[in-house]
């Protein structure tokens, strides 16, 4: 035992000692007379990461300054560190006599542990550890034990722990009897464990020597590795195997870890046969095993601090690998996997426990201290059972193979004896075996043939001599035929033809020829017969060949004709596909047998669905004008020999749309007989409605000329009347009675003026004066104005990014005004008008009489009574109305305005559900001019006015009114005179202040 006593000068030690003892009295362990054992973990305080050179006086100062931390675990663990761990604890002896106890530090792998025992004014140091020979220990035991004599009262001890390995503090205080009892129980159990391991080591080693099965060798390596590691881990190796070799005692710990891992990884590859079932995984484990073998040398090259951490880390990785391999083997249904998984789980659990304890994750306890030994014992036993099971499996497989061999031999013998062909074995020119078939083939018994010389059964012919030649070649090692034709001699002397298949083998070391002999005599006779028949067939074949040449020429001509027919058919189909008209062919019953793409589109379905159906059930035509149903075109063609409706238009429903067509057709003749009809449908929908639109515009143009002339003259008359009435009102402003009569006359005249204004707008005289504007506000203002006070509500659906339009605001307002009034009047009991405005791009996908481009679409929808279908084509005609007091100019005027703006208006209506008028106006990218010109103030009367009008009445009214305000009026009746007057005023430097002109003067 190595003891080092050292007196340390501590001037104030005794003074503070009593204070320290009193302060921490609550953390002391009470050692009574009947004391057995206690774990000190919860009674100790510790100070970690203390520099190695720190002495006891500094530690006492730190303890006094409360720098020590109280332990909260039974067995504190601190992982790895280059510094020291200081631990202090207090034992209290309540009796008056000294007490003898043992302090056990149950971790034999610690490098240096020093106990500081207070002795008066100084401390006595007791130093030990695995860096010191076993003989220097204060108590001869596998772990570190310190005998203590407790004086009455409380005594505080300090413990310094230093190690390059894991730092744990498994401290216990034992009574002498309890310690001896514990040792008497645990030591036999430990040696039983190691005895079992040693027995299993020799058991597997002997099995390897006897069977050469590598699994036994590798498991033996693993057993010796884990056994020596366990003995080093619990201190028995230092006590019994190398008590004086402290250097080896330190490095053997990680060395045996790597050695055991090498054994278990090699065992895994061999035991689970990974190179046959999991080749990639086997390669990975082999490479990892090579790394582990390289790590075997790290304890000799690296410091213990790094080598032991590396061993723990690699052991954890190896544990994960063997668990993963076991799971994969279980999935692959490898029989040995069940033993392997149970065994490795036990071992890995122990390895993980010791690894977690080494890094300080788990505290030191029974499971972390002994789990490795228990797991390894269970693992070795299960591995041995697994190997034994594998050996038994081999034995059963061998017995099964022998049984199968016996069965196979019996089957072989049965096959040989019952074979139809003859089988013989020949050794040294003598028949040593023959089957019954060969004996029957030659007329001998089996007994007669066995032992007979080969030459006695060979015919004396060239084919017979071939048997001797081939057998001699085989005996001498020269090339011989595997199969050849020969002749043998029967017992009766008759010669038979045979086919021999022979091969040379070794039986009991003797070259033996195995021959299978087939009697082909019947085949030879059949061959002769077949040859004769062949000659007859050959002559017939030559005759057939001549016939075949004629057929080939005929076939070529038919092929050429078919090819031309296919080309003609393809040209016909290409023509039908490319033409714009719909083409349909029918049989005599009127069923469709052919339809081109255009006809399919008109029918609204594919040709597969209309082929075979009656033509009249797919295409039903009506006259456009009278709506009467047209006769069946097929019957008309069959009756009259042709069909042509180019003089009148027909219509039918296609995709819920009316399609206008012209029909033409003719019969289909084959060899002068009618076999069907062909009908051509020429789609003239666009042309028809375009002509209708042109007719309507032409009618409107004619009416507009008439309306313009009437409206102009009528407007002049009304201007005179209304103007004179205005003057008269000024003259008799004091006579209320006369004023009332004047007002009535003026109201009637104003209604006539409004009608005249519509006629002017309808005529060419109302050409739009366009400006860029947004339609949104115009629509809303007109709707609010018209519907104010009515029972009708208006909902707006106007796109927020609505494009601008370049329109005459007044004329477009009149259109909206007319349409909203009509919608309101169609709902006398009230309802909802929905006005939707959105951007629209026309790309000719829809048939509309407008040019492609950007438009603004305005839809005005009501919930009124609707428009009868027969009136839809007439509602835009001038003077057409269904109202009792309507003028018939509202929609005609709207239509005229929209057309002058280059737009389009259309209507959709259904009786009882309402109508929707849809307007398309050209959109523009120009910006709206927000700024409006300010009105010039009327400052003072007076000035010169040039008035140009062809109606003298207008002149009289206008001049009289202007005279009232102090203006001087010059009147001319033509535009030419107006220009002359204006030039004269400029020449005299007396220009006119105001020029008033009639824009529709005839001839000007």
Image (cartoon, helix red, strand yellow):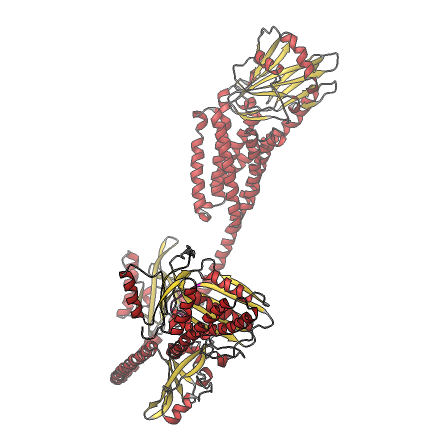
The residue positioned 48% from the left and 34% from the top of the image is 314
User: Which span is picked out in magenta?
Assistant: 839-846
Q: Nearer the viewer, residue 437 or 24?
A: 24
Residue 894 relative to residue 343: left or right: left
| Of 317 and 331, the residue lying toward us | 317
Name the residue rendered at 32%, 77% in the picture.
Answer: 574
Residue 305 vertical placement versus 965 (above, below): above
Q: Residue at x 43, y 46 (%)?
A: 280
Q: Is residue 130 left or right of residue 942?
A: right
> What percent of the width, then of the height, locates residue 717?
43, 75
- Number of marks: 0
The answer to if 841 sits in the magenta stretch is yes
Residue 628, given in percent of the width and then of the height, sits at 47, 87
Q: Looking at the picture, how far across and down is residue 972, in whole percent?
A: 33, 70
Rendered-image quadrant of the C terminus: bottom left
The quadrant of the rendering that contains the N terminus is top right
Q: Is residue 457 left or right of residue 35?
A: left
512 lies above or below 18: below
228 in magenta = no
């Amino acid at each position: 035992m190595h003891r080092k006593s050292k007196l340390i000068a501590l001037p104030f030690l005794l003074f503070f000692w009593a204070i320290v003892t009193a302060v921490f009295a609550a953390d002391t362990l009470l050692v009574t007379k009947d004391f057995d054992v206690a774990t000190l973990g919860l009674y100790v305080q510790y100070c970690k990461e203390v520099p190695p050179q720190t002495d006891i006086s500094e530690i006492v100062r730190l303890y006094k300054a409360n720098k020590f931390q109280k332990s909260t675990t039974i067995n504190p663990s601190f992982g790895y560190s280059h510094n020291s761990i200081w631990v202090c604890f207090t034992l209290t002896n309540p009796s008056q006599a000294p007490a003898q106890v043992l302090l056990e530090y149950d971790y034999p792998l610690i490098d240096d542990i020093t106990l500081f025992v207070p002795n008066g004014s100084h401390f006595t140091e007791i130093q030990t550890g695995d860096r010191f020979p076993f003989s220097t220990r204060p108590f001869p035991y596998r772990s570190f034990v310190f005998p203590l004599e407790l004086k009455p009262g409380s005594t505080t001890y300090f413990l310094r722990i230093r190690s390059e390995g894991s730092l744990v503090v498994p401290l216990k205080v034992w009574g002498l009897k309890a310690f001896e009892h514990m040792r008497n129980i645990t030591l036999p159990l430990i040696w039983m464990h190691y005895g079992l391991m040693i027995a299993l080591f020799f058991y597997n080693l002997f099995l390897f020597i006897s069977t050469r099965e590598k699994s036994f060798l590798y498991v033996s390596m693993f057993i010796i590795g884990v056994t020596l590691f366990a003995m080093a881990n619990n201190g028995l190796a230092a006590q019994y195997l190398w008590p004086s070799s402290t250097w080896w005692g330190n490095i053997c710990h990680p060395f045996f870890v790597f050695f055991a891992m090498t054994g278990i990884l090699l065992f895994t590859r061999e035991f689970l046969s990974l190179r046959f079932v999991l080749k990639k995984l086997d390669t990975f484990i082999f490479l990892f095993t090579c790394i582990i073998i390289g790590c075997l040398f790290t304890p000799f090259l690296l410091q213990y601090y790094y080598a032991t951490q590396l061993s723990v880390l690699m052991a954890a990785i190896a544990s994960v690998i063997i668990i993963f391999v076991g799971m994969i083997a279980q999935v692959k249904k490898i029989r040995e996997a069940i033993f392997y998984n149970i065994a490795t789980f036990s071992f890995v659990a122990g390895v993980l426990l010791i690894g977690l304890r080494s890094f300080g994750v788990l505290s030191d306890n029974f499971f972390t201290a002994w789990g490795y030994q228990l797991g390894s014992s269970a693992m070795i036993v299960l591995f041995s059972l697994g190997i034994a099971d594998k050996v038994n499996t081999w034995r059963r497989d061998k017995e099964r193979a022998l049984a199968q061999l016996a069965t196979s031999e019996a089957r072989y013998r049965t096959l040989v004896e019952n074979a139809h062909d003859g089988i013989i074995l020949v050794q040294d020119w003598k028949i040593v075996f023959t089957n019954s078939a060969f004996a029957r083939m030659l007329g001998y018994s089996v007994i007669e043939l066995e032992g007979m010389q080969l030459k006695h059964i060979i015919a004396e012919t060239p084919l017979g001599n071939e048997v001797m030649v081939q057998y001699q070649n085989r005996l001498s090692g020269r090339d011989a035929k595997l199969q050849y034709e020969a002749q043998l001699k029967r017992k009766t002397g008759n010669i038979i033809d045979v086919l021999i298949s022979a091969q040379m083998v070794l039986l009991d070391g003797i070259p033996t020829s195995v021959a299978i002999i087939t009697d082909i005599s019947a085949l030879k006779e059949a061959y002769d017969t077949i040859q004769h028949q062949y000659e007859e067939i050959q002559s017939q074949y030559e005759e057939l060949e001549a016939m075949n040449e004629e057929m080939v020429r005929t076939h070529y001509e038919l092929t050429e004709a078919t090819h031309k027919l296919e080309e003609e058919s393809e040209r016909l189909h290409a023509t039908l596909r490319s033409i714009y008209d719909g083409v349909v062919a029918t049989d005599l019953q009127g069923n469709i047998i052919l339809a081109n793409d255009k006809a399919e589109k008109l029918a609204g379905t594919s040709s597969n669905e209309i082929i075979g159906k009656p033509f009249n059930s797919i295409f039903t035509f009506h006259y456009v004008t009278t709506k009467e149903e047209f006769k069946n075109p097929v019957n008309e063609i069959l009756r009259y020999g042709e069909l042509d409706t180019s003089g009148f238009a027909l219509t039918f429903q296609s995709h819920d749309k009316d399609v206008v067509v012209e029909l033409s057709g003719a019969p289909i003749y084959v060899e002068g007989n009618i076999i069907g009809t062909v009908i051509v449908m020429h789609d003239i929908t666009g042309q028809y409605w375009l002509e209708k639109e042109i007719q309507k515009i032409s009618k409107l143009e004619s009416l507009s000329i008439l309306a313009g002339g009437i409206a102009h003259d009528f407007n002049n008359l009304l201007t005179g009347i209304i103007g004179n009435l205005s003057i008269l009102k000024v003259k008799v402003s004091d006579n209320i009675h006369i004023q009332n009569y004047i007002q009535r006359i003026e109201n009637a005249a104003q209604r006539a003026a409004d009608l005249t204004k519509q006629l002017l707008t309808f005529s060419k005289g109302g050409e739009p004066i366009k400006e860029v504007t947004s339609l949104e506000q115009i629509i809303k203002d007109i709707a609010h104005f018209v519907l104010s006070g009515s029972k009708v509500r208006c909902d707006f659906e106007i796109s927020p990014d609505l494009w601008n339009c370049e329109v005459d605001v007044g004329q477009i307002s009149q259109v909206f005004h007319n349409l909203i009034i009509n919608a309101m009047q169609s709902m006398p009991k009230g309802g909802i008008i929905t006005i939707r405005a959105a951007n629209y791009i026309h790309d000719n996908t829809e048939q509309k009489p407008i040019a492609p481009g950007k438009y603004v679409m305005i839809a005005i929808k009501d919930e009124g009574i609707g428009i009868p279908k027969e009136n839809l084509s007439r509602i835009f005609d001038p003077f057409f109305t269904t109202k009792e007091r309507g003028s018939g100019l509202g929609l005609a005027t709207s239509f005229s305005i929209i057309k002058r703006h280059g737009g389009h208006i259309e209507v959709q209506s259904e009786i009882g559900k309402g109508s929707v008028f849809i307007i398309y106006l050209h959109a523009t990218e120009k910006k709206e001019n927000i700024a409006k010109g300010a009105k010039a103030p009327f400052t003072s009367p007076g000035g010169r006015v040039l008035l140009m009008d062809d109606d003298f009445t207008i002149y009289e009214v206008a001049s009289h009114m202007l005279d009232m305000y102090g203006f001087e009026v010059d009147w001319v009746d033509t535009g030419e005179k107006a220009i002359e007057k204006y030039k004269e005023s400029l020449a005299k430097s007396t220009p006119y202040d105001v020029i008033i002109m009639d824009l529709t003067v005839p001839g000007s």
